[in-house]
Amino acid sequence: MRILITNDDGINAPGLAVLEAIAGEIAGPDGEVWTVAPAFEQSGVAHCISYTHPMMIAEMGPRRFAAEGSPADCVLAGVHDVLRDTPPDLVLSGVNRGNNSAENALYSGTLGGALEASLQGLPAIALSQYLGPETRDLENPFEAAATHGAAVVRQILSAQEPGGSDYRLFWNVNFPPVPAAKVQGVRLAAQGRRAGTGFSTEPHLSPSGRRFLWIRGGDQRVAATRGSDADVNLGGFISVTPMRADLTDHAALAGFEGSFA
């Protein structure tokens, strides 16, 4: 198996090293793992692509490339340049430092890479490690992902994808904020919503007196939709969420038919 990996934390991020190990286990001794990752951190860029300016790509080592672009850019570079004659069988994105459950999924560059792979017709999985008090003092805060990642990827790959959509599935996997030994299992879960929390801004003055705004994240441990990804993560479970690029609310579409007849 030939696997392309990327992330949004940058090519030197520790979570990417965890993903390299997961991908190597999935690919097997006769497989190949290719890395095309952002040269610099690209957290929060979602499915952004560098449509209006070029990006430089540099070979950092065997099967290892850094691109000055977003995770989606990196997937495009991997598919159409680095591996243009030998396309990958699978794209893995992550392992993100922090969760991409609930509303975080909408901002995530990690998911943006997996989404772009799905639009290219490739199976794709995004993997993220929820962090919290129980992971803070671990020697490896990605311990849960490192221990259970390959098994979850295999479980997803063995599942039969249902048809009926022009958009291919991609998968959002979030590992809970606990040590590997305390992981309770795997749960299929919908994307949730953490009510009353979200991103905001915080003003600061520079030494020269200029006013700047920092983007500030919300509390990641507040209650989420019952049974949703963030909810099961906080209960110690790995969440697995199938997603598509289709943003249509099909239930609302049917409900509004009379209003727009």
Image: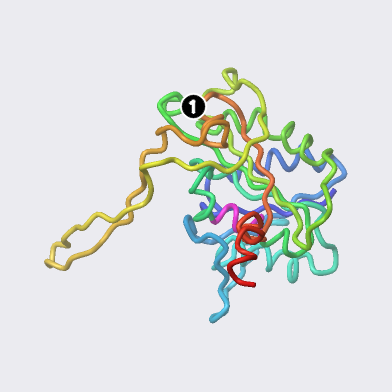
Q: How many marks?
A: 1
Q: Is residue 181 above or below residue 249?
A: above
* Residue drawn at the location 60% of the way across and 71% of the way down: 260
Instruction: Tell me if residue 40 is in the magenta stretch.
Output: no
Which residue is situated farthest in the bottom direction here?
52
* Residue drawn at the location 51% of the way across and 52% of the way down: 9
Quadrant assignment for the C terminus: bottom right
Q: Amino acid at mark 1?
A: Glu
Residue 235, given in percent of the width and then of the height, sits at 53, 24
Horizontal arrangement in the rendering, residue 196 relative to residue 203 (left or right): right
Q: Nearer the viewer, residue 206 or 253?
A: 253
Dominant SS in magenta: helix
Q: Which residue is mark 1?
A: 139
Q: Secondary structure at mark 1?
A: loop
Residue 93, given in percent of the width and then of the height, sits at 64, 50
Where are the magenta residues, as a range? 109-115
Q: Nearer the viewer, residue 106 or 215?
A: 106
